Amino acid sequence: MLRHPEVRLLHTGMGPARARVAAARALAIDARAVAVAGVCAAVSPLVRPGDVVCADDLRRAGADPIGVPAAAVVAHLLHERGFRVHIGAVLSTERLTKPADRRALPADTLAVDMESAWLAAGADGRPLAVVRVVADAADRALIDPRMLIDGPRALATLWRISDALVEWAREPVVPHDRASSRQTAEL
């Protein structure tokens, strides 16, 4: 995103505490829309490293889910650019999750991260998009040697998705019917 002069980029860092601080900082920025982007771990075995997850529902323990109706529009923009895209729920957790923990999550959860549900507060009524690139597969731990390939690949994909997010943010189209944006299969 650094190559887009009209974009204000906030680096959050990892974890809920840093996400809360970044969300508070985002409230002070005059922006038409807010896009959250980062990496995640897959929950669904259908989601592979390098895939893009557009969250249509953000969840975290002890809080109501947060709907993200722009998911289908952003997913379409990414799919048009050749990315393998999934739309579904992302669960934000307090700490890293192990594969066994992920297997115990609800079947409709596509991915887990440690920031998105807290960062959503930074949108404060503005259109919100949440896009995560899968760094580790559902059955793999973070310390798996394949992360040496999949981690950098996910980060490279993260930078490549920025054009689609900027296009969406220029004129953030958000469907009025949240139910119509829900897709369980990949695009």
Image: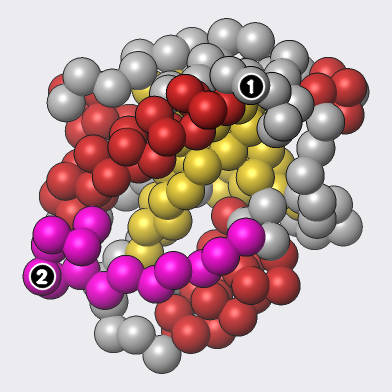
**Magenta stretch prevailing secondary structure:** loop
Q: Is residue 47 left or right of residue 108?
A: left
Residue 4 x, y percent position in the rendering? 12, 62
The amino acid beneath tag 1 is Pro
Residue 16: image x %, image y %? 71, 65
Identified at 73% across, 15% down, the residue is: 139
The amino acid marked with disc number 2 is Pro
**Residue 187 x/y as whole percent:** 35, 14
On residue 136, which mark appears? none
Give the number of the mark in front: 2 or 1. Answer: 1
Range of the magenta residues? Answer: 1-14
Between 135 and 29, the one lying in front of the other is 135
- Distance from Cα at disc 2 to Cα at disc 1: 37 Å
Residue shown at the point (57%, 9%) measured from the top left: 46
2 is within the stretch colored magenta: yes
**From what the image shows, is residue 133 above or below residue 46?**
below
Is 76 contained in the magenta span? no
**Residue 145 numbered mark, or none:** 1
